[in-house]
Image (cartoon, helix red, strand yellow):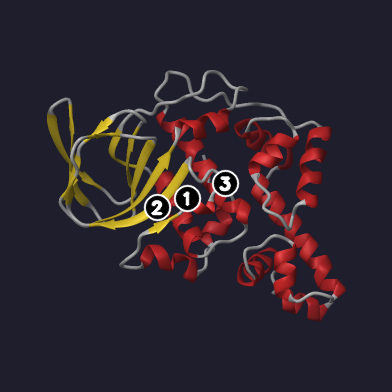
Amino acid sequence: MSLPNRTNLTETRNEQRSLVESDDFVVPFSTQTKWCSEFVFEVHRLPPTEVAEHDIEGHHLLVNLGQTVRCGWQTGGRRYENAFPPTGICLQSHGETNASFWQDEMKVAVIAISPKFITTILSDRTPAAIDTFVEQHCLQDDIAYRHARALAAELDTPSEPLYAESLCLSLALHLLTAYSGKAGKPFIPKGKLSAIQLRAAIDLAQTQLGDRLTLDQLASAVNMSLFHFIRLFKSTTGVSPHQFVLRLRLERAKRLLLMRQLSLMEIAQAVGFFDQAHFTSAFRRAFGVTPKAFASQS
């Protein structure tokens, strides 16, 4: 499992990192996602605490964004202690009980994924939906950690809307692949999109570049589950849907720049970027020059 558009992650701007490098932050991510009530991402700094036993609602993932934390939990009447390492995760499924404690201040990403979210991803086009995860405590997981850092950066400086959604989905698929609670793993579709299916997805993207385009809309255009669509789209085009749509946005921006009728802010909005700053950054990464320089050289 790889992060969508990993190149962009390695080149993340310093200001995008300011959130996870800061000392005090509590920020909700749920309002930034299409599945607001079904995929909730939050970043917290928590003081040493002991939590009473309670039932878990939704699948819960904790990702350690800070230093090693002395922690523990209670299962079956027995108390366990361990070290929660940097890049470490703790994972529990919906309906399980939890009683945990930590003895050090903890900087952590808290992710709650509803069972409905998993069903939405897999739809009815795969074998029986995988609705549980194998419980994990203090396990290092660099992939989940990189996703959490990238999502935290998106909270601080939102970028192209489809990117955050891609990160959420990619993290969920990683968890399904690595920690499925059932014997079978998610079915990995093979093959490619047909020419008609690919054309339908591209046509939709081109007509809605300036709008809130979602992965679900693209998958619905070809009558596929999100899981199948993302896999087959990348197999067909060589890039993720997010990367493909980003290129469409930038190519349209180039045409608008050549027309010299709109400001940079107006062009950024017209092609679907969150703001002018992200538009300029993405344009420079793709073409080696800023939009302003491109317009002046043309």
Does the residue at mark 2 contact the one at mark 1 (Cβ under 8 Å)? Answer: yes
Question: Residue at point 79% right, 67% down?
Answer: 254
Give the CA distance from mark 1 to mark 3: 8 Å
Estimate the x, y position of residue 218 in percent, counting from the top left: 70, 41
Determine if residue 66 is in view. Answer: no
Query: Label 1 belongs to which residue?
Result: 30
Does the residue at mark 1 contact the one at mark 3 (Cβ under 8 Å)? Answer: no
Question: Residue at point 20% right, 35% down?
Answer: 53
Which residue occupies the extreme right position in the image? Answer: 259
Q: Indicate left or right for 25 with 249 as reference.
A: left
Query: Label 2 belongs to which residue?
Result: 42
Give the CA distance from mark 2 to mark 1: 8 Å
Which residue occupies the extreme bottom position in the image? Answer: 296
Q: Secondary structure at mark 3?
A: loop
Question: Residue at point 60% right, 22% down?
Answer: 124
Query: Label 3 belongs to which residue?
Result: 34
Q: Indicate left or right for 220 with 200 as reference.
A: left
Estimate the x, y position of residue 117 in percent, counting from the top left: 51, 35
Q: Indicate left or right for 85 with 186 as reference.
A: left
Determine if residue 206 is in view. Answer: yes
Q: Secondary structure at mark 1?
A: helix
On-image quarter of the C terminus:
bottom right
* 158 relative to 257, above or below: above
* 169 relative to 12, above or below: above
Q: Nearer the viewer, residue 218 or 71?
A: 218
Q: Secondary structure at mark 2?
A: strand
Q: Amino acid at mark 1?
A: Ser
